[in-house]
Every structure is written in C-alpha cells, then in structure tokens.
Image (cartoon, helix red, strand yellow):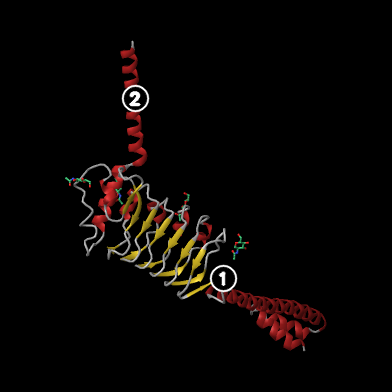
C-alpha cells in the first residue's frame, strides 16, 4: 500500500516536473537567449576581442552565458539574459538587431563604443521591456524613432553624444515612467517633449536648436512662417475678391444706367448694340465712359 502510494506520488512529481520544464522552456526561452548572444557577436566588430575572448559557445553547461563579459542573467545558473552591459569595449557596427531574441532583457547599455547608422525604426519591438536603454557616446545618426514611445517601461533613456538629427518625437512625452532623459550633444532641433509626469531629469544641452519647456518658447520657425504666408495669401485673396465684387456691381449698375439712357437716346442704343459680343468688363468700361 505504502509502495503504491509512494509510486503514485513519484509519478505526480515527475509529471509536475515535466510540466514545469515545458513551461520554463516556453516562458524563459533560454535557447533563444543563446541565439541572441550568438547573433550579436556575429553582427558586430570587436577589435579589442572583449567578446571573442569571453563569449565561448562551446561550453554548454547551464547558465554558461551568464559568465560572459557584459552579460547579467536573471539567475546565475539559467541562460536568461537580464542585462547586457557592453559599455566602453570599442565595439563597431550597426545596432545589433539580434537583441530581439533576448526576450527577457530589461537593460541594454551600448554606451561609449563606435556604433553607427540609425537607431532602428522598430526598436520598440526589439527591446520591448527595457527599463534602461543607454546608447550614449556612439556615432548613431538619423532621427530618434517615434516607436521608442512604445517602450513603456523605460526609466532611463540616454541618447546623448551621438549625431542624431531632426526633432524629438513629441510622443516620447507619454513615457510615463521616465526618470532620466538625456539627448545632450546631438544635432537636434525643434520643441522638446512634454513629459506627462513632469519629474524626469532631462538634459538637452549642446544641440542645434531645441526649444519649449524649460528652454523657453519656440521662436518663429518654418511652420509659423508658413502660417504668415497663409494669412498674407488670405488677405490678398480677400482684396482680389472685393475688387472683383466691386467690378461686377459696377458692371450691372452701368448696364442699368445704359439701358435707361437707351430708352431716351437712340444714339446710345446704337452704341450698346455695337458693343454686343465684346467682353463684359471692357464693355462696362466703355459704357462708363460713354455715359459720363
Ligand atoms: C565549462 O564552464 C564551467 C563553468 O565556468 C567550467 O567549470 C568548466 O570547466 C567548463 N568546461 C569546459 C569544457 O570548458
Ligand atoms: C531570432 O530567433 C529566431 C529563431 O528563434 C531566428 O529565426 C531569427 O533570425 C532571430 N532574429 C534575429 C534578428 O537574429
Ligand atoms: C505602438 O504600439 C501600438 C500598439 O501596440 C501600435 O499600434 C503602434 O503602431 C506602435 N507604434 C509604433 C511607432 O511602433
Ligand atoms: C504639457 O502637459 C501639461 C500636463 O499634461 C499640459 O497641461 C500642457 O498643456 C502641456 N503643454 C504642451 C505645450 O503641450
């Protein structure tokens, strides 16, 4: 009896373990985290061999990637990447898209390297859950992607010391948890975002022309210039319309006067008939002269 019970407990145990194993495999996706690091290593240049010397994928013990340079795992014995800290390693190349397969990542630090090219448009689908994203002190160019506003867990966003151009997407203001927002030392222009929570520490120093918020009201920009153009255009239009209206009124007035004249003056009648077929404005002009 005891034997039967214990064997039953044993099989339940095995079954539960099996379930846990499956669910861990699905939820944690440690295989994809390994693939993530492999793709990153293959996609970037590492002239100082920081990764080459440490990121060895041949030793397949559980949690082996957690001992790689710059890799922090959720648990030291589980291949699930929590943070990737690759600061100041002399790394080169484009933003590593392979990061998409580190699906449990909460922090990415690529600061102080030689990364270049644009920040991917779809960055929010590559690092959806990061609370900290530091791309500072690289050579990233192009515009700040609006999709960063979809990284809703962001506490820290550092894009300073790059070559970013254009305007800062206003939608970044919707990042509700942002505490540090640094875009200093870039080539940005236009209004700064209006962070809804208002407690963010921001740094906008050394850009080409940022304004708004604490930086003061945005002065006449191209958009307000075009506003002026619209107003001027409308004024010209109104004057033209008024002149045209006046012309039409005058034409009918003069024509009525001519009609009245025609009844009492046969010569005028002849005049009016001779004008038949000529253009209205011209006719009114001539009639006006004739009548006065
Ligand atoms: C694999 O890594 C573990 C932990 O770092 C180490 O103890 C072991 O010697 C390594 N095995 C091989 C074959 O490199
Ligand atoms: C992510 O992993 C999948 C397999 O799980 C692979 O097909 C894909 O190429 C990887 N994505 C990137 C950007 O490396
Ligand atoms: C942000 O997320 C929403 C909802 O998932 C999606 O509809 C939208 O296209 C995303 N925007 C960007 C710029 O990625
Ligand atoms: C900024 O946000 C505050 C609070 O949400 C709002 O009252 C204010 O009008 C906004 N200012 C601009 C310039 O959008």
Left or right: 241 in relation to 170: right
Left or right: 236 in relation to 178: right
Q: Is the residue marked by circle 1 packed among few (<14), some (14-19), or many (20+) residues within 10 Å? A: few
What is the quadrant of the N terminus in the image?
top left
Q: Is the residue marked by circle 2 packed among few (<14), some (14-19), or many (20+) residues within 10 Å? A: few
Q: Nearer the viewer, residue 225 or 37?
A: 37
List the residue tagged with mark 1.
Answer: 214
Left or right: 260 in relation to 202: right
Q: Which of 39 and 237 is in front in this view?
A: 39
Q: Is mark 1 on a helix, strand or loop?
A: helix
What is the quadrant of the C terminus in the image?
bottom right
Measured along the vertical axis of the image, is residue 162 above or below residue 2? below
List the residue tagged with mark 2.
Answer: 13
Measured from the top left, where is residue 20 in percent x and y?
A: 35, 32
Q: What separation in Å lies between label 2 and label 1 (alpha carbons)?
A: 61 Å
Q: What element carries label 2?
A: helix
Measured from the top left, where is residue 125 in percent x and y?
A: 40, 51
For the point 51% across and 59% down, the residue is: 171
Q: Which of 119 and 204 is in front in this view?
A: 204
Left or right: 59 in relation to 237: left
| For marks 2 and 1 on the same chain, the one whose residue lies earlier in the sequence | 2
For the point 27% across and 47% down, the residue is: 34
Measured from the top left, where is residue 174 in percent x and y?
A: 53, 57
Q: Nearer the viewer, residue 282 or 144?
A: 144
Image depth: mark 2 or mark 1 in front: 2
Residue 201 - label: none
């Amino acid at each position: 009896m005891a034997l039967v019970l214990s064997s039953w407990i044993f099989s339940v145990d095995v079954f539960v373990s099996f379930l846990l194993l499956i669910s861990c495999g699905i939820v944690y996706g440690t295989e994809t985290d390994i693939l993530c690091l492999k793709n990153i290593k293959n996609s970037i240049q590492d002239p100082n061999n920081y990764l080459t010397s440490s990121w060895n994928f041949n030793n397949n013990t559980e949690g082996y990637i957690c001992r790689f340079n710059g890799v922090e795992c959720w648990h030291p014995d589980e291949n699930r990447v929590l943070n990737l800290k690759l600061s100041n390693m002399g790394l080169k190349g484009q933003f590593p898209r392979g990061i998409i397969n580190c699906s449990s990542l909460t922090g990415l630090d690529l600061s102080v390297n030689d990364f270049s090219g644009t920040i991917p448009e779809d960055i929010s689908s590559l690092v959806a859950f990061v609370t900290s994203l530091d791309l500072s002190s690289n050579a990233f160019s192009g515009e700040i992607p609006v999709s960063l506003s979809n990284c809703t867990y962001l506490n820290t966003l550092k894009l300073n010391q790059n070559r970013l151009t254009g305007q800062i997407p206003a939608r970044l203001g919707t990042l509700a948890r942002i505490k540090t927002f640094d875009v200093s030392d870039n080539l940005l222009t236009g209004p700064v975002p209006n962070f809804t929570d208002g407690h963010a520490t921001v740094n906008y120093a050394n850009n080409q022309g940022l304004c708004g918020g604490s930086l003061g009201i945005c002065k006449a920009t191209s958009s307000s210039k075009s506003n002026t153009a619209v107003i001027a255009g409308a004024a010209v239009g109104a004057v033209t319309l008024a002149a045209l209206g006046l012309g039409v009124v005058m034409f009918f007035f003069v024509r009525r006067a001519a009609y009245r004249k025609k009844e009492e003056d046969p010569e005028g009648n002849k005049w009016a008939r001779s004008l038949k077929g000529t253009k209205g404005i011209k006719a009114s002009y001539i009639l006006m002269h004739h009548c006065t």
